[in-house]
Amino acid sequence: MIVLGVESSCDETAAAICSNNEILSTIVSSQVIHSKFGGVVPELASREHEFLLNSIVDEALVEANIHKQDIEGIAVTRGPGLAGTLLSGVCFAKGLAQGLQKPIIGINHLEAHIFANFLADPELDFPFVCLLVSGGHTQLWLVTDMNHYTILGTTRDDAAGEAFDKGARILGLGYPGGPEIEKLGKNGNQRAVDFPRAFLNNKRLEFSFSGLKTALLYFMDSNKEKDNINLEDIAASYQQAIIDVLVGKLVQAVEKVNVKTCVIAGGVAANKSLRKTVNKALSNTRVLYPDLSLCTDNAAMVAYLGELYLNMGVSSSMDFDINPNLKLA
């Protein structure tokens, strides 16, 4: 089955073609217009999607060497995400589905991130623990089968990716913050500043990053007059505080449910220091990561998951709605 995937949940405009569980093409356009604002401006993002979607889909078709009429189904992200940007993608996908008289399915963005790991390793099997960590979510899931997801833990406030973005803004860096902090702290001392690690020694599987962000703000304010302040050390220490909590809770989750496989999903999964720390802490556990191109928002994971559902005979009615606060379970 040839499935077109469309992704527009935030500031990436993306399209991909999947056929028989193989990605034939994947095109992602990251909206650079937001960089000067230090974060995503929803109205601008929606306009960019409307401007780009048609050309991005055409580019995906050309790369896959297929025609629009060859599409047998369409999958589109319906949530969670920004309301306006989701609406841009869903309206486009519905119009195309109606014009081609093809089935359409609305996809849960979080579920698609989890299933991106099946693209990384088709031999991945249930059950497994997933650390889903992105700009909007930091969650631990027990995945026992398709449509069988149990939440093990989540954040009380900021997501890890949000903490990276806000930390980068405090440090005067660009957006998105994760790659910027990772780049700055590459040669820094990870233990130079003892930033707080909320709930690290607590047995409950929950996260909190708002206090860490505040600690960074206070640290920078109290040291702004000093000439010997080392931003590389600060960035490295801030990043390590986030990673220590993520990995600590992941280890607790794996031990709690006693599974032998875990996967990391979401944009923060691209962080090399996170991967290194996870591999060291879970050396006796099989750990999978998506390819770097599949960590951040993309349409390949949407098309792949959409094909799975459409092959099962599951589709959406044409009047399905977006859901900016869509839950996984």
Image: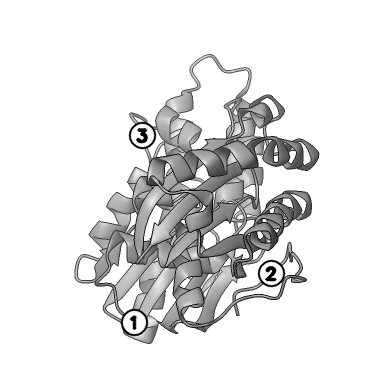
Q: Is residue 242 visible?
A: no
Kind of residue at disc 3: Asn
Q: Residues within 10 Å of mark 1 (few under 14, many from 20)?
A: some
Side of 254 relative to 169 (left or right): left
Residue bearing the label numbered 1: 126
Q: Is residue 287 visible?
A: yes
Which quarter of the figure has residue 142? bottom left
Q: CA distance from mark 3 to mark 1?
A: 39 Å
> Relative to the observer, which residue lies in front, 37 or 165?
37
Kindly identify which numbered label has been placed on residue 326. Answer: 2
Which quarter of the figure has residue 277? bottom left
Residue bearing the label numbered 3: 189
Q: Position of residue 177 (x, y in %)?
A: 55, 37
Tell me which residue sits at (65%, 47%) in the image.
Answer: 10
Tell me which residue sits at (77%, 55%) in the image.
Answer: 83
Kind of residue at disc 1: Phe
Tell me which residue sits at (60%, 56%) in the image.
Answer: 159
Looking at the image, is mark 3 or mark 1 earlier in the sequence? 1
